[in-house]
Amino acid sequence: MASDMAEAIRQLIYEKGISEDLVLKTIEDALVAAYKKRFGTAENAVVRFLENYEGVEILSKRTIVEDVEDPVLEISLEEAKEMAEGAEPGDILEIPIDPREFDLHEVMLAKQTTRQSLREISRDTLYAEFKAKQGEIIIGYYQREKNGNIFVDLGKVEGFFPKKFQSPRETYQPGERIKALIAEVSKAGPQIVLSRTHPEFVHKILELEVPEIYDKTVEVFKIVREPGYRTKIAVFSHRDDVDPVGACVGLKGIRIQNIIRELEGEKIDVLKYEADPRRFIKNALSPADVREVYIYDEAKRSALAVVDESQLSVAIGKQGMNVRLANRICDWNIDVKTEEQFRELDLGSEARRAASSLFGDEEEILRLDELPGVDERVCTLMGVAGIEMIEDFLARSDEDLLAIEGLTVEDTDILRRIIEENVEVIEEEAEEEPEPEPAEEEEELDVYECPDCHATVTPDMTNCPQCGVALSFEYEDEDATDPES
């Protein structure tokens, strides 16, 4: 029957996961420490385990001498011959140490040292084992609960499943099987922190359900979550013949349905990653149908998505969740507007052209600085010369343009090409000057006499030019007029 020591050693090896050599070395070190405490040195101490760990013995190596000077390191020839026939001076003799030679304090010290060392070894071993598994999925069983935090039996160690890492959609019962991600591993304990809300948990579930992700044919660009409500997964493929979204969804949606069941009904949007931010933002706002995406400021990563009125609430989502997740997965600040709201925005020339492009309206470009791709330096030189409008530029001769300081032939050629590509120049046909109409002959006025001085008067006079009497003309019909004073 195995001794208590043998049983304890086997338990440490098989249950605690500590290597055999490490266990034996720990016990040996503790016994050597006790030997040193008793004899003042440990250089001649030997620890030897019996077969199957049935026991352990401590031996003291002593040199055989004629005259003993140090009884701890030496033994007389006479005593040596009593223990071993044929002993000669200079030989090394291993002498068993009677455990009774150790006092209680030395024995307790050895036990305490052994326990402490084995605890540290067990902790370090478990820490190293689970640290290597961090980011992996593990299965345990509900053990107990305290303040909403759940303690999970993981076999060798107890896992800690904090409330903040539990999905609000899920509930657990004692003894229930729990599949979770090893999110953190700390050396104290060690403590194994579990999570079902981490995006990496979804990633690992995807690897289990989608072979193309496991073998890297399809890769996950990014996963963002509102745990318990909605997850967005951006994927891409290294092969043109593999549809990354279709691979994740599976035939008739069977793969994605398995993941949804694992997440207790959480909504999942699988979208294709695109290098072009406009197309990626458009995909990220799914399930909304986005008409177009306009980049406000590329440096600040701000963009505008234009949707139909019926799609506005879908794009924004309940409590803004959909657009919030789209912001996070694209790493852009996305504003969502309807066509009418977009038209009402106070936009600059670039934005106005974008609006025209979005809605099919042609907006006339009149200024040089409104041309797409025009060199700002050229516009500045033109502005200094008083040339701001496209019409003014086209009206100038090459000699006039090259007279502008800093402007080159290449500058003018590039500018003309940009104008040709973006502006429809309509030359007005010279209108023929109409021939002057013949002057109408002045209508001859009727002549009358002043009733006072008989001077000649006409109907356009109000007073007689000779006597100054006031004149008044009354017409009975179109052909007869009699003047009266």
Image (cartoon, grey):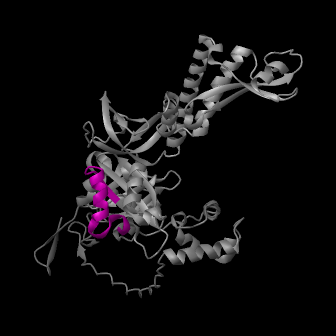
* Residue 252 in which image quadrant: bottom left
Residue 82 is covered by the magenta coloring: no
* Residue 441 in which image quadrant: bottom left
Residue 402, image x and y in percent? 70, 72
| Residue 335 left/right relative to 381 | left
Residue 257 is covered by the magenta coloring: yes
Q: Nearer the viewer, residue 139 or 52?
A: 52
Residue 194 lies, with reference to residue 48, above or below; the image says below
Residue 384, image x and y in percent? 64, 60
Q: Nearer the viewer, residue 29 or 84?
A: 84
SS assignment for the magenta stretch, majority:
helix
Residue positioned 79% across, 19% down in the render: 79
Q: Nearer the viewer, residue 234 or 165?
A: 165
Q: Give the magenta range.
A: 246-269
Residue positioned 37% across, 58% down in the render: 305
* Quadrant assignment for the C terminus: bottom left
Residue positioned 71% across, 18% down in the render: 36
Residue 188 lies, with reference to residue 459, above or below; the image says above
| Residue 176 left/right relative to 299 | left
Would residue 50 be seen by someone viewing this image from the given angle?
yes
Residue 151, image x and y in percent? 35, 33
Q: Nearer the viewer, residue 199 or 375?
A: 199
Residue 251, image x and y in percent? 29, 70
Residue 22 lies, with reference to residue 106, above or below; the image says below
Would residue 273 be seen by someone viewing this image from the given angle?
no
